[in-house]
Image (cartoon, grey):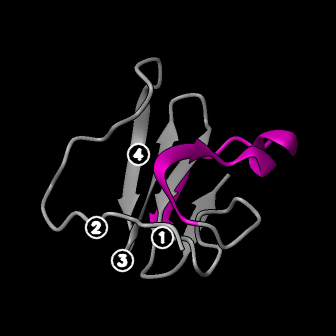
Amino acid sequence: AAFISIQAFPALLDLPQELEVSAVSCGSRHTAVVTRGGELYTWGWGKYGQLGHGNNSSSDQARRVEHLVAKGLRVEEVVCGPWTTYIRV
């Protein structure tokens, strides 16, 4: 099982420098950001598939949700629930 650090206090986002973030949302144990280009990046606990990567894997590193890119979808907004992630395209 992957170890996922849980941050109980505010922390700086560790994202690639070239990304310009337009929205951030935090769930119970995961985080999602939308870039100005409409891409969605997620990381954290993924047991219920809430990271959107097509599996139940967890990740401490921000990863782009490739399914949305492949479908040509531009994300406008993201809202995370305790174990869910909702987007508006």
Q: Is residue 72 visible?
A: no
Element type where label 2 sits in the image: loop
Residue neighbourhood size for the residue with mark 4, other residues' Cα within 10 Å, grouped as few (<14), some (14–19), many (≥20) = some
Marks 4,3: beta carbons within 8 A = no
Residue 73 within the magenta-colored segment of the rendering: yes
Marks 2 and 4, the one that precedes in the sequence:
2
Residue 68 in the image: state x and y as whole percent: 76, 48
The residue that label 2 is drawn on is: 6
- Say whether residue 65 is magenta: yes
Task: Kindly identify which numbered label has been placed on residue 28.
Answer: 3
Residue drawn at x 69%, y 41% is 74
**What residue span does the magenta drawing correspond to?**
58-79
Q: Amino acid at mark 3?
A: Ser
Name which quarter of the figure residue 38 lies in.
Answer: top right
**Circles 2 and 4: CB atoms closer than 8 Å:** no
Q: Which mark is residue 35?
A: none
Q: Is residue 65 left or right of residue 2?
A: right
Nearer the camera: disc 1 or disc 4: 1
Q: In this figure, which residue is indicated by the disc labeled 4?
A: 23
Depicted 30 relative to depicted 12: above or below: below
Q: Amino acid at mark 1?
A: Trp
Report which residue position mark 1 lands on: 45
* Amino acid type shown at disc 4: Ala
> Few, some or many C-alpha atoms within 10 Å of disc 2 (few <14, some 14-19, many ≥20)?
few
Quadrant in the rendering for residue 25: bottom left
Give the spatial CA distance, label 3 vs label 1.
Answer: 9 Å
